[in-house]
Image (cartoon, rainbow, N blue to C red):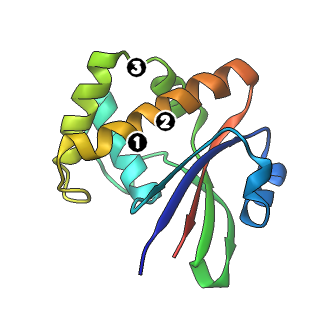
Amino acid sequence: MSLLAELYLSKDDQEATKYDSQPELFKDREQYSSFTELELSTLWAKMRGVDFDVNSVDGPRQIFVVDDGERIIHRLPAAMTIDLAGLTPEQISTAAIKWAKTDELACEPSEVQPIIEGLVRLAKNASATQRNIYLWNCV
């Protein structure tokens, strides 16, 4: 079973929920697999140089769930979008190294760096257009 992880921009939560049935309407998006809001929260902690703690992280907020969690949409926090938009190429590389070493991912930095680069691209576009970043997961 594969886990789809798609990141996209939307102006608000109501519009964002349409992604579940009409993803083609959302032109500004990135399509990946195998990560959830947990891994994104871990990335954000690594970017900020803090230890990840599921109880203290203000991570992505769930705005949509169907079929007992088979499809879920989360909105990334505005502060995370700001942090992502400000990453330099060197900081992206450093974040990829740290994120890849986490227990949740345990992979090579080269496997996650494109995800971070996609997030940075979306974050810059979100900031420029006053939109939010959303994560859609489907099992």
- Give the spatial CA distance, label 3 vs label 2: 10 Å
Q: Which residue is mark 3?
A: 87
Mark 3 or mark 1, which is nearer to you?
A: 1
Above or below, 131 relative to 71: above
Check the picture and name the quadrant holding the N terminus.
Answer: bottom left
Above or below, 79 relative to 42: above
Q: Which quadrant of the structure image shows residue 97?
A: top left
What's under tag 2, amino acid-wise?
A: Leu
Query: Relative to 36, is 16 on the left or the right?
Result: right
Query: Relative to 53, is 69 on the left or the right?
Result: right
Q: Which residue is mark 1?
A: 115
Residue 128 x, y percent position in the rendering: 69, 18
Residue 118 x, y percent position in the rendering: 48, 36
**Crowd tier of the residue under label 3, counting other residues whose Cα lies within 10 Å: few below 14, some 14–19, many 20 or above:** some
> For the point 51% across and 76% down, which residue is it?
139
Dot 2 falls on a residue whose secondary structure is helix
Between residue 99 and residue 62, name the one nearer to us.
Answer: 99
> For the point 37% across and 53% down, which residue is it?
39
Residue 70's label in the rendered image is none
Query: Relative to 10, is 92 on the left or the right?
Result: left
Q: Is residue 70 visible?
A: yes
Q: Are marks 2 and 1 in contact (CB under 8 Å)?
A: yes
- Give the spatial CA distance, label 2 vs label 1: 6 Å
> For the point 40% across and 59% down, which residue is it?
35
Q: Which residue is mark 2?
A: 119
- Give the spatial CA distance, label 3 vs label 1: 13 Å
**Crowd tier of the residue under label 1, counting other residues whose Cα lies within 10 Å: few below 14, some 14–19, many 20 or above:** some
Between residue 66 and residue 19, name the one nearer to us.
Answer: 19
